[in-house]
Image (spheres, rainbow, N blue to C red):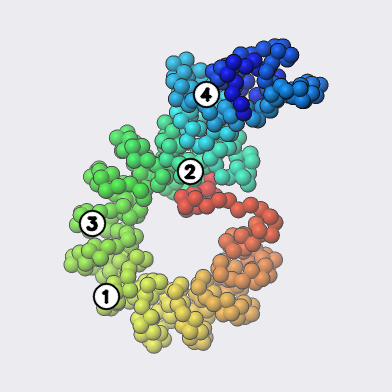
Amino acid sequence: MNSFENKKVYFSGRGEKIDKEELVKFVIQNGASLTEDIDEANIIIQGYMTPVHLEDQFYLLSKDGKELYTIEELERWFSNELDLDSVLMAIKISKEKQRVINLLKNSYFNDDIFVKILKYYNWENIGIYDSDDNRDVATAITSRFCSLVESNHNIQHSPIGIYYTALETTNPKLLEAIYHMPHYEISDKNAHENQPITLKEVVALNPNTPLPTLIQILKENNSNELLFLAQNNSINKLIRKKLFELNSIEIKRNLVNANNIEDEFLDTILATTELKKEYLQNTELTTEAFKRILNTTLEDIDIIYLSANSSLTSEQISILFGKEIDNANINLLRNSNCPLENINQFLEKNDKIFNIAIASNETLPSEIFEKLLSNNDFDVKIAIAFNTNTPKDILKTLYERNNEQINTALSQNSATPINILMQLQVDSRFHSYVSNNETYKEFSKNTLGIISQRDSGFKRNTYLDTI
């Protein structure tokens, strides 16, 4: 658009995405004056809802040399040229709430500008959905940042929209703004155990939350928020240390289960009955931690817990096999890092329990599957049918046996070929299993043309399907 300097502007209709009053201020700030006389105008802005007869008149005047711009052109220019600092200062001084709302509805602004404006909105210490203004702002946030809007347009108007947005967003500045919004919580009627209920709990758990906000959560010392902060995989060593030093077994347990434990705390954990089991089973073990664990006094049950740790390396697994504890060996044989040498040693024992454990290992080569299949043990075959790494030709062979228990396993296995799942799906005995099979669900979405939801790393490993 050309300069407005020293020009007279005739403005018809109204703004579409931006309030007309805001646009008029912008035009005047750029050196123009407004006129109600079309004939004396140098520039005509054809606003939204302009009568058709005026549109025809504007077109003819543009042929005679008057500058004619659509409301979309003006709104884009406004959005690109806006002196945001000046606008925010004016808002801060005047406290024009409606002006903030109007700016937040501007889809031409990028996300950073949106969040800067959002911080100036006054929620007036009432609920996010307890006034029309607050609902408008909540809708603007959800419609811009929540990917679920793509597949469910109504989510932007739903009270759950803000929760979903906080759960999945990767925008640190937005998470900071959400943390300072009024208290909001979802119904815990269908919530899973250890699921965040409030917005602040979600922010505490989200790994994209910025460090200053994480520190503020720590200082606020809200017990529920601290429980979720302890599970946040992005917290630094200082925050992990501060959380561990709090007198709370629950917080320590969440630190352990989220692998947020420093090796310096190992002795304390191993001396704490309530934490020892979780640590041995769940923490991603460093080489140093594994050595220190073995140098402590361990009962057989401790070795069994340790053998269930999925982070064990092949070398560590071989060391634990040397302890010769049957229940520990069962866990080790299931581990995807179990050395093939050890698997073959236990295959030679031809022990039913060990064979079932081996059949559950998801990194077996095809020849091991063939060997297990040939021993004619029905329970081993069921384990093979559950294994997502079982070769498809073996899964097909198992399906041809037409056994209900084996087909129940195949119905739940995401590696089962889709043509078999489709046949199992029409059988009422397996319908619910197949319906929840990820491979079948993805096939159904693609077949029906349903848009898959975007993946954010965070949202897919939490609670979107449980609320």
**Marks 2/3: CA–CA distance:** 31 Å
Left or right of residue 300: residue 180: right
Q: Is residue 123 above or below residue 265?
A: above
Pointer 1 with pointer 2, Cβ within 8 A: no
Residue at image coords 31%, 38%: 215
Q: Identify residue for label 3.
A: 263
Label 2 vs label 3, nearer the camera? 2
Q: Secondary structure at mark 3?
A: helix
Q: Identify residue for label 2.
A: 169
**Marks 1/4: CA–CA distance:** 64 Å
Label 4 vs label 2, nearer the camera? 4
Q: Secondary structure at mark 1?
A: helix
Q: Identify residue for label 4.
A: 100
Q: Secondary structure at mark 2?
A: loop
Q: Residues within 10 Å of mark 1 (few under 14, many from 20)?
A: few
Q: Pick whichever, 122 or 199, lies toward us.
A: 122
Q: Which is nearer the N-term, disc 4 or disc 3?
A: 4
Q: Identify residue for label 1.
A: 319
**Marks 4/2: CA–CA distance:** 22 Å
**Marks 1/2: CA–CA distance:** 43 Å
Residue at image coords 43%, 77%: 358
Say whether residue 17 is visible.
no
Q: Residues within 10 Å of mark 2 (few under 14, many from 20)?
A: many
Pointer 1 with pointer 4, Cβ within 8 A: no
Q: Which is nearer the N-term, disc 3 or disc 1?
A: 3
Q: Which is nearer the N-term, disc 1 or disc 2?
A: 2
Residue at image coords 48%, 43%: 169
Q: Which is nearer the N-term, disc 2 or disc 3?
A: 2
Pointer 4 with pointer 3, Cβ within 8 A: no
Q: Position of residue 25 (x, y in %)?
A: 57, 18
